[in-house]
Amino acid sequence: MLRTVSWLMRAGAYAFIGLHTFTGPPAGAGAVTLAVVTYALGGLALLLWELTHTLGDEAARRAPRMRMRVLLGVAAALSGYASAFPHAGALIALSLMAVMQLGTELSLPVGWAVAGCTVVALETGVLVAGASRGFALGYPMLVVLVLVASHNRRAYRIRAEQSAAMLAQSELLRAEQRRVAVLDERTRIAREIHDVLAHSLGALSIQIQAASALLTDHRDIDRAVTVLDGARRLTVDGLAETRRAVHALRSDLAPLDEELATMADTHRQRHGVPVRLRVEGEPSPLPADQALPLFRTAQEALTNAAKHAPAQPVEVTLTYEDEHVTLTVGNPLDAPPPSPRQPPAFATVDGGYGLTGMRERLLLLGGTLDAGVRDGQWRVRAEVPR
C-alpha cells in the first residue's frame, strides 16, 4: 500500500514538473531540446528503477544493478545541469527524486558520489547559463538536504527491517520453546507412567509369588486369599496413580513427610515387616519437581527391599537441611532363618532400571542418588538441592 502511494506521488510530481517546464514562456531551441531529453531520461530512469523494486527483491537482484545506478545518476546530474537554464528550474526536482532514491536504497558513499556529481553538473550549468548566485548556492544546499534526509530514511527502513526480522525470530523462538515444553511434558508423563508401572508391577509380582508360595508350599488358602486381596488393591492403586500421572496432577501430592508416612504404613501392612520413618530437621514444603522424585525413589527402594529382603525391617530417613533435602532408605542384608509360614525371597521383575531412572531424574534437578552396601545394610540415598 505504501509503495503504491509513493509511486503515485512520484508520478504526480513528474507530471507537475513537465507541466511547469513545457507550459512556461518559450525558450531557445537548444534549451528546449535539453529540457526534453533531460525530462525523458529522468522519467525513464525513475520508471525502470521503480519497476524493478515493485516486482520484488528477486527481480531487483536479477536486474543489471550497476547500469540502473549509472542511469539514475546520469539522470540526476543531467537534470541538475538543465535546471540552471531559463524556465527549466523545475527539473531540479528530478535530480532530487533521483538522489532520494539512490540515497535511500544504496550505501552512504554511493549517495554522496551521486549528490556530488549532481552539484558539479548544476554549478557547471550555472556557469554556462549565467544563472543567479542564489541559484548557485541554494540548489546545491537543497541537494545535500535531500541526501541527508534520504540516508535518515534508509536508516529508519533498515531498523524497521531488523525489528521485523527480530520479531520473526522471536516468534520462531517462542514456537520452538512451546514445542520443547510439549516434548518435556510428554517425557515427564512417560517417566511418571514408567515409574508408577515399575513400582506397581514389581509389588504385584511379589504379591502373586507370595500367594503362589502359600498355596503350593503351605496350603494356606486364607492367607493366600488375603495376599491376593492385597494384590487387587495394589492394582487399583496403580491404576489410580497411572491416571494421575497421565493427567499431570502433581499438585495433588501431599507434603513429602506425610506421603512417606502413608507409604510406610502401606508397606508395613502389605508385607508384614517393620518400617520406621524418621524426619530430621524442620519440614518445609518442597516444589513438586523436587518432592516427586524423592517420593518415587522411596517407592522404588521399598519395592526392592520387599523383593530382595522380604523379612527385614526398613528404615526411612528424611532430612531437611539448609541447602538440600536428603532421603535415605536402608535395610539389613542378612536374612533370618525363614519360618514355616514365611514365604521365600522372590525374584525381581526388572534389571535394576528403576534406580537408574531415579538417578537420571535427580540429575536433571542437580541432585544425586547413591545405592550400595553400607555397614552391612543395603542403603539408597537421594539428595535434591533446595
Image (tube, rainbow, N blue to C red):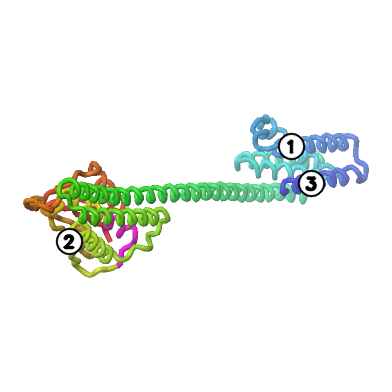
Q: Is residue 38 visible?
A: yes
Residue ID at (69%, 33%) = 70
Q: Which residue is mark 2?
A: 275
Residue lying at 87% horizontally and 46% vertically, measured from the top left: 20
Extreme bottom residue here? Answer: 282
- Image coordinates for residue 59, horizontal then vertical, percent: 68, 33
Left or right: 371 as drawn, with respect to 163: left
Image coords of residue 161 (percent x, y): 59, 47
Drawn side of residue 91 relative to residue 362, left or right = right
Q: Looking at the picture, does residue 57 appear above or below residue 275?
A: above
What SS does tag 2 mark? strand
Q: Earlier in the sequence, mark 3 or mark 2?
A: 3
- Mark sitting earlier along the chain (2/1): 1
Q: Pointer 3: what residue?
A: 8
- Above or below, 89 against 48 in this view is below
Extent of the magenta region: 285-297
Most foreground residue, 340 or 231: 340
